[in-house]
């Protein structure tokens, strides 16, 4: 008879293999949509473990979907892999740990799925830091038949799966007319003035926004020289809030501010989305509670599991509106190193971090086992999801 212990023992049996995979990916950081080495290594290992792998999913070269089908009725359980690095500082967000954690969790669950019934899917999702592949995957319906989607993020503490902010990434490009700034400034149309007007009025808008809103931007082109009236200037903004509807409302206001800036300065305006839009994360609390129960069963005190504080933006949000999902944080370092820093990057390559990765994989696999083994738990997860999304 299969037990959760079988899952844990299988993970231990394969631990060295996935430690090596994690080290290899961590040592060869690749930016989003350039993860040729990482996606190839993960796909090959999935095939060795008996999964059928589709490479280049949706025409995205470094995306993949691996599946193992028991041939019996049961839930479809998704484990999500991220493996892109950050510019200049490499795997400072620990994605080399995320992908290996999800992979070995899937391998552990595979040891019992033939008896429990159901399917296991491993999604290779490139470019989470920028144009996250989960967005087009979700839009294409690739998660619609999944009963649950699981992943965990490495961190300096344990955190419950919490919330994230819906996000729009907008570029504003203003075009004017160049002129000599001293000899004939009246012949020019100043594109930089339009960008400055945009920032000024966005700053005024912030006073009228809800407390969970975030609007922040940069000037990525402000002209060529101070003695030339800029004929081109551009800015990039992130517009975020706790839900998609309000984010849409804010984005429309910021776009109108940009149009007003163009009108006031006599410039022409081009607006575009330079990254994909992310939806807010809808944590399935029933599924999250089961993950936390596994942490406690493994020896953690309840007070060691902090409340989710994630106020960034995740492309997992787009998955979470398609199927029940969680995104907890798992402690892999003992110092409070911040994500996206060189200190975290270096700590995430240590044996301590790899131990944390294996532990996190056991918690993910144990939670998936609980769902596959209990139709009652699965029905409660589904009921909560339908209640969330019907709103």
Image (spheres, helix red, strand yellow):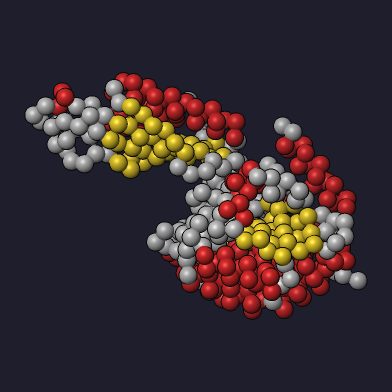
Q: Is residue 169 above or below residue 125?
A: above
Q: Residue at x 77, y 75 (%)?
A: 9
* Percent position of residue 278, x then y: 56, 42
Closer to the camera, 6 or 334? 6
* Percent position of residue 272, x then y: 44, 36
In the image: residue 282, left or right of residue 188:
right
Closer to the camera, 268 or 79? 268
State which quadrant residue 264 falls in: top left
* Percent position of residue 11, x then y: 72, 73
In the image: residue 185, left or right of residue 339:
left
Q: Residue at x 14, y 36 (%)?
A: 227
Quarter placement of the N terminus: bottom right
Q: Is residue 366 above or below residue 130?
A: below
Closer to the camera, 307 or 346? 346
State which quadrant residue 370 falls in: bottom right
In the image: residue 123, left or right of residue 6:
left
Quarter placement of the C terminus: top right
Closer to the camera, 75 or 1? 75
Q: Residue at x 85, y 61 (%)?
A: 71
Q: What residue occupies the far front of the structure in this picture?
A: 59
Q: What residue occupies the far right of the structure in this picture?
A: 1
Q: Residue at x 58, y 73 (%)?
A: 21
Q: Is residue 203 above or below residue 352?
A: above
Residue 362 shows in the view:
no
The image shows a total of numbered marks equal to 0
Q: Is residue 351 above or below residue 273?
A: below
In the image: residue 270, left or right of residue 41:
left
Residue 102 shows in the view:
yes
């Amino acid at each position: 008879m299969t037990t959760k212990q079988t899952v844990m023992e299988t993970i231990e049996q394969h631990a060295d293999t996935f430690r090596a995979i994690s080290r290899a990916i961590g040592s060869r950081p690749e930016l989003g949509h350039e993860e040729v080495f990482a996606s190839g290594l993960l796909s090959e290992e999935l095939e060795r473990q008996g999964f059928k792998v589709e490479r280049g999913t949706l025409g995205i070269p470094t995306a993949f979907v691996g599946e193992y089908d028991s041939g019996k009725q049961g839930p479809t359980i998704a484990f999500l892999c991220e493996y892109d690095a950050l510019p200049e500082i490499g795997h400072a967000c620990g994605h080399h740990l995320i992908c290996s954690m999800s992979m070995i969790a899937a391998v552990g669950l595979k040891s019992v799925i033939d008896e429990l019934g159901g399917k296991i899917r491993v999604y290779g999702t490139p470019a989470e830091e920028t144009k996250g592949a989960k967005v087009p995957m979700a839009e294409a319906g690739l998660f619609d038949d999944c009963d649950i989607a699981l992943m965990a993020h490495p961190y300096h503490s344990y955190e419950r799966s919490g919330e994230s902010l819906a996000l729009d990434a907008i570029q504003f490009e203003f075009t004017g007319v160049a002129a000599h700034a001293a000899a004939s400034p009246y012949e020019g149309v100043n594109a930089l003035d339009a960008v400055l007007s945009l920032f000024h009025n966005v700053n005024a808008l912030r006073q009228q926004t809800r407390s969970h809103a975030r609007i922040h931007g940069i000037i990525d082109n402000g002209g060529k020289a101070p003695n030339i009236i800029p004929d081109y200037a551009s800015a990039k903004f992130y517009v975020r809030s706790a839900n998609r509807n309000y984010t849409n409302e804010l984005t429309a206001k910021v776009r109108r501010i940009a149009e007003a800036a163009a009108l006031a300065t006599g410039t022409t305006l081009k607006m575009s989305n330079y990254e994909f839009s992310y939806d807010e994360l809808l944590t399935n609390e029933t599924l999250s509670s089961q993950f936390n129960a596994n942490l406690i069963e493994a020896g953690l005190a309840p007070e060691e599991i902090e409340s989710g504080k994630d106020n960034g933006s995740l492309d997992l949000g787009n998955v979470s509106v398609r199927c029940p999902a969680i995104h907890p944080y798992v402690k892999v370092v003992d110092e409070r190193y911040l994500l996206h820093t060189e200190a975290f990057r270096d700590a995430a390559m240590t044996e301590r971090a790899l131990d944390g990765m294996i532990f996190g994989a056991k918690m993910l696999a144990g939670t998936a086992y609980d769902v596959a083994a209990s139709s009652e738990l699965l029905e409660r997860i589904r009921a909560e999801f339908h209640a969330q999304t019907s709103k």
